[in-house]
Amino acid sequence: MTPIRHNGSGGSERSDASADTDARAGTARPADDTARPAGDPVLDAVRDCVLAVGVRRTTMTDVARRAGVSRMTLYRRWPDVRSLVGDLMTREWIGVATGAMPERRPGVPTRTLIVDGLVAGVAAFRAHPLFRKILDVDPELLLPYVLDRRGASQEALLELIAEGLREGHADGSVRPGHPALQARSLLLVVQSFTLSLRTMTDPDAPDLSDEAFLAELRTILERTLTP
């Protein structure tokens, strides 16, 4: 629910502007430039900065000061703020997606787990403070992932969904189909609910509330996956 061209190597979600800057400056991304684990003080610092003032007003100086490192230390790993934010989004979005997937429960078919996880994921993304801040203040950061290419977090989520679909095919709870096609189709559905739901809700109409739409999403997913 979720700017660079993903190259399939687990790279982060960076913008074309950042990639162009790298190309002009001859800057190479570090070989270990993947989603960094929770607790990275630099990513924690940029998260605090973005939540406070948004992406456009965040500077490398601000991030360095909050993280307690020098600006040169930052520039060794990231060429600019957008690349920093890209790595932050990758970390946060993958954390939300994986955290929303329920644990296996005896007697519960895989289809139910997939549907529960996707609906919970949409709700979790919409409640996530960083996602809300970016959507409200810097929505252009999300557009490439919707219109042009997939980012690292989308690739991770597709892999997670496809794995569940294969298990659902095996236990008979999910209708047969190509796992990649089904996973990508499901992601298209849940992305639209994640990004655009507020354009469809009506605070004065209980039947058009967030909860009502999430219930409708559950129905859509169930009917899509039921054999």
Image (cartoon, rainbow, N blue to C red):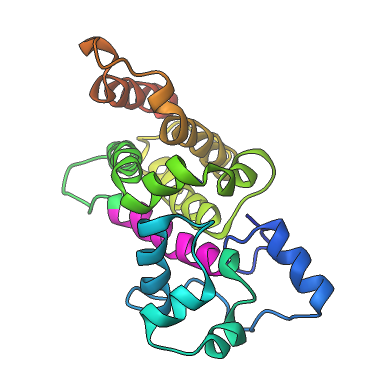
Percent position (x, y) of residue 85? 51, 63
Percent position (x, y) of residue 196? 46, 29
Front-most of residues 132 and 9:
132
On whether residue 144 falls in the magenta region, the answer is no
Image: magenta residue range: 84-99
Q: Residue at x 64, y 76 (%)?
A: 79
Q: Residue furthest left?
A: 106
Q: Residue at x 59, y 55 (%)?
A: 151
Query: Magenta stretch mostly in which secondary structure?
Result: helix
On whether residue 92 falls in the magenta region, the answer is yes
Percent position (x, y) of residue 82? 58, 63
Percent position (x, y) of residue 72? 57, 89
Front-most of residues 6 and 59:
59
Residue 92 occupies quadrant: bottom left
The reply to whether residue 156 is visible in this rendering is yes
- Classify residue 111 as left or right of residue 157: left
| Numbered circles on residues, count | 0
Q: Which quadrant holds the C terminus?
A: top left
Q: Residue at x 46, y 65 (%)?
A: 88
Q: Residue at x 64, y 84 (%)?
A: 31
Residue 20 occupies quadrant: bottom right
Front-most of residues 166 and 40:
40
The reply to whether residue 5 is visible in this rendering is no
Front-most of residues 13 and 21:
21
Residue 78 occupies quadrant: bottom right
Depicted 41 relative to depicted 20: above or below: below
Depicted 33 relative to depicted 20: above or below: below
